[in-house]
Image: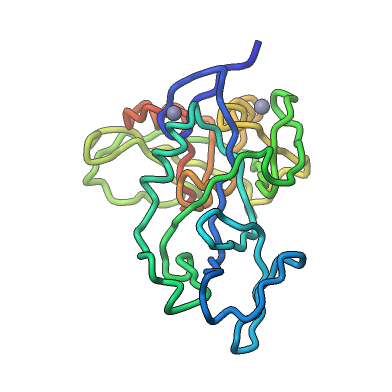
Amino acid sequence: MNTIKHCEWCGSGTSNFIYRFIFEPEYTLFLKSRMINIHDRQRQCVYLEDGREFEYTFLQPNDTAIYITEALPHIFCSERCVDNYLEKHSIFTGNSIHEKTAIHSLKQDGYFVPGIVEPRKVSHREDECTQCAKSFPNISKLFRAFLIKSIEEVRGNLNDGPSHGADIIQSDISQENPYGTFYHLYFNQPMTPLDKKVTFCSNECSFDFSVKNNCMVMFKDNVMKGVSAIISPVTKKINEGLSNRYVFSPQIFR
Ligand SMILES: [Zn+2]
Ligand SMILES: [Zn+2]
């Protein structure tokens, strides 16, 4: 029997969850552009008429090719949620863009426009989860765990200024939930990750590990637009306080 995991997009729990790699293209090449002189499919690169050369990671159906440097595994409950996620982040770039340029980077323009690929369609490795020992598909997701010295809970509200002294402050206070709790996390300084190498199949397992070992787990998260994210023993309480449907949602590291 499969474990139940929750969809990182809608929060529904299911044992039929699916993994998808989410990537953010470094740049997109428009293969129909007249500025491309040669398209070398074997070496996966193009040569522009101005002499520049660009490699790509894979071809896409719409006569484009993209170059990526990383892809992170995420859990969805269904194809519908995958589509909803993509739709939420898509932007219209126009059909004639290839007439003006051969290469474009939305990332450099400051947009987060992710793509998704099924694990079976790209080469990847299987990592073993430190917490549950199950294997999961991975390409480049890295985790670091930091031992927490102490966590202090302070009641507060939206008008309270940031308090000082704690290494990291998290809270469940928002416009919708103006009265809540500030969680002050303290660490040994300088903050150094555990020597033990950790890797997790899901946010659930990162959370279970953080509770069991009194740690904060840090990683990059593409459902959260590529930010550094953290999961700590107070993650579930924070999401419940914020009335988030997905109670294992990581917090943004700041
Ligand atoms: Zn879902
Ligand atoms: Zn696991």
| Image quarter in which the N terminus is found | top right
Q: Nearer the viewer, residue 96 or 111?
A: 96
On the image, the x and y values in percent for residue 197 come to 76, 41
Residue 149 appears in the picture as rendered: no
Left or right relative to 81: residue 45:
right
* One can see residue 254 in this view: yes
Task: Name the side, left or right, on which 51 lies relative to 253.
Answer: right
Place of residue 116 in the rendered image (x, y in percent of width and height, measured from the top left): 54, 46
Q: Which color scheme does this rendered protein use? A: rainbow
Residue under the point 27% across and 40% down: 174
| Pick the front one: 248 or 238 | 248
Relative horizontal placement of residue 226, taking residue 69 as reference (left or right) = left
Nearer to the camera, 138 or 47: 47
The quarter of the image that holds ligand 1 is top left
**Horizontal and vertical percent position of residue 207:** 57, 29
Foreground residue among 40 and 27: 40
